Amino acid sequence: MPKIVDHAAHRADLALRASKYFSKHGYAGGSMRNIAEYLGVSKSALYHYFPNKESLFLACTEQVMSQVDVGVLNESTTQQEQIQQLINVMQVDFGSEMALLFDYLRNKSKAEIAENEAMQVSIETYRKMVEAIVGASKTDETLAMIMGTLLLDHLSGGTWTASSNLRSI
């Protein structure tokens, strides 16, 4: 009897597991062969689901971003507290995510980045998370503040605080 495979579920599982590889080794740090070995599949099986590393990275981005749960925010708290909760959630992997992001974007032009589907998925997911807290009119301003806060916190080794800046929202 032939084995029944849920191809969509298997593809999603491969992408989710490959995202861990990218987090550890960076985008440039791996070939499809290395990633296939890490996943325990043949290179041809990996190519069956993803025609190239770029499409695999997009699938990884889609999988990771689809698992972002805004529901972890306590809706009974103030906007400022919800923003701080979101910052706390994003802060956990911020450094490694930014390292991977810049590795992936290296040598891409601004036009290529602007049209890059993985970046569009990421930005849209972040916008939706923030919009759920502050509304559409303050989404981009608040997202910029959050990303700036996370970057400054990371660059300062965790000593920078934005509590006074959060009050301006």
Image: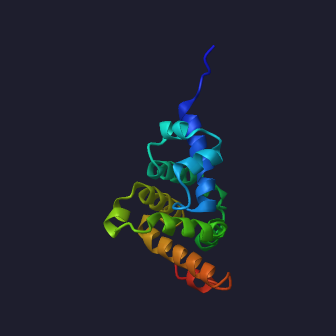
Where does the image place residue 91, in percent across and percent down from the top left?
Answer: 64, 70
Q: Which of these two is toward me, 12 or 100?
A: 100
Picture quarter containing residue 89? bottom right
Where does the image place residue 43, in percent across and percent down from the top left?
Answer: 54, 41
Q: Residue at x 52, y 60 (%)?
A: 27
Quadrant of the rendering where the N terminus is positioned:
top right
The answer to whether any part of residue 68 appears in the image is no
Q: Residue at x 58, y 65 (%)?
A: 97
Residue placed furthest toward the top:
1
Tell me the colour scheme of the image: rainbow
Left or right position of 153 against 121: right
Left or right position of 9 against 139: right
Q: Which of these two is toward me, 119 or 20?
A: 20
Picture quarter containing residue 87? bottom right
Q: Residue at x 56, y 84 (%)?
A: 165
Where does the image place residue 38, in percent across and percent down from the top left?
Answer: 64, 48
Q: Residue at x 56, y 46 (%)?
A: 15
Relative height, residue 84 to residue 60 (above, below): below
Where does the image place residue 10, in percent across and percent down from the top left?
Answer: 58, 36
Query: How many numbered marks have been drawn onto this rendered protein structure?
Result: 0
The answer to whether any part of residue 18 appears in the image is yes
Q: Which of these two is toward me, 103 or 67?
A: 103
Relative height, residue 160 to residue 135 (above, below): below
